Image: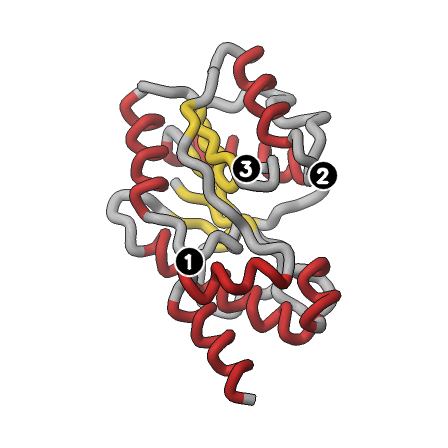
């Protein structure tokens, strides 16, 4: 099962750092495009059921699970555990991962499904992670971790190792937080995100 974590793409609530440079309306427009591109990617993968984990309205039909209360760790842990109960393993990703190869998702799924790994992490360039996958989720597995810091991935890897489930590490990828990242969206992004950027240039 693949869980796509997202915020409702409303102006002022998404991509706030990016919005400081391009404005909240454009940031929200881009967030919708990222969400559509990511959903089309995961929905195209045979044998992996996609679920949108989101509080609020979705811009397209999808199976939606609410994120609920708590910090990011609590919300992810709750959704991952539900996914594991339903499918035997669960993979969680965000939406601002332009051009993420489907092969990365397949690599994570194959490792978890085959039992070669009980956890998978995809490290992001900024020190976080763009993907986490688990075949079991002990209580508190993601509690008390430093979120949105340069040490997030390292701390998560250490926690999983302490729990006896050292993660398989995927190749590094990037996410989009700053205006300078938009050039990489032009180069690597999905069709919806690239169309949004092209539309801005024509205005």
Distance between the alpha carbons at the discs numbered 3 and 1? 19 Å
Residue 192: x %, y % from top left: 43, 70
Task: Please state the horizontal and vertical placement of residue 189, each as a whole percent of the image.
Answer: 42, 62
Q: Which is nearer the eye, 116 or 177?
A: 177
* Mark 2 / mark 3, whichever is N-terminal: 2
Q: Residues within 10 Å of mark 3 (few under 14, many from 20)?
A: many
> Mark 3 or 1, which is nearer the eye?
3
Q: Residue at x 47, y 79 (%)?
A: 198
Q: Earlier in the sequence, mark 3 or mark 1?
A: 1
Q: Which residue is mark 3?
A: 129
Pointer 2 residue: 71
Q: Which residue is under mark 1?
A: 39
SS for dot 3:
strand
Q: Residue at x 64, y 58 (%)?
A: 178
Please name which of the two marks, 2 or 3, marks the residue nearer to the observer. 3
Q: Is residue 104 above or below residue 5?
A: above
């Amino acid at each position: 099962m693949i869980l796509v974590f997202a915020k409702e793409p409303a102006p002022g609530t998404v991509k706030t750092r990016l919005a400081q440079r391009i404005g909240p309306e454009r940031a929200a427009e881009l967030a919708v495009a990222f969400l559509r591109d990511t959903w089309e990617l995961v929905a195209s993968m045979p044998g992996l059921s996609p679920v949108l984990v989101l509080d609020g309205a979705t811009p397209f039909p999808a199976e939606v699970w609410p994120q609920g209360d708590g910090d990011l760790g609590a919300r992810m842990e709750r959704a991952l555990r539900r996914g594991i109960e339903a499918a035997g393993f669960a993979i969680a990703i965000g939406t601002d991962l332009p051009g993420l190869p489907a092969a990365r998702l397949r690599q994570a799924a194959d490792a978890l499904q085959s039992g070669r790994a009980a956890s998978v992490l995809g490290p992001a360039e900024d020190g976080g992670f763009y993907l986490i996958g688990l075949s079991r989720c002990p209580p508190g597995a993601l509690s008390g971790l430093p979120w949105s810091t340069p040490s997030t991935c390292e701390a998560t890897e250490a926690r999983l190792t302490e729990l006896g489930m050292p993660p398989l590490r995927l190749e590094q990828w990037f996410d989009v937080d700053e205006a300078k990242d938009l050039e990489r969206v032009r180069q690597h992004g999905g069709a919806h995100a690239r169309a949004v950027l092209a539309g801005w240039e024509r205005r």
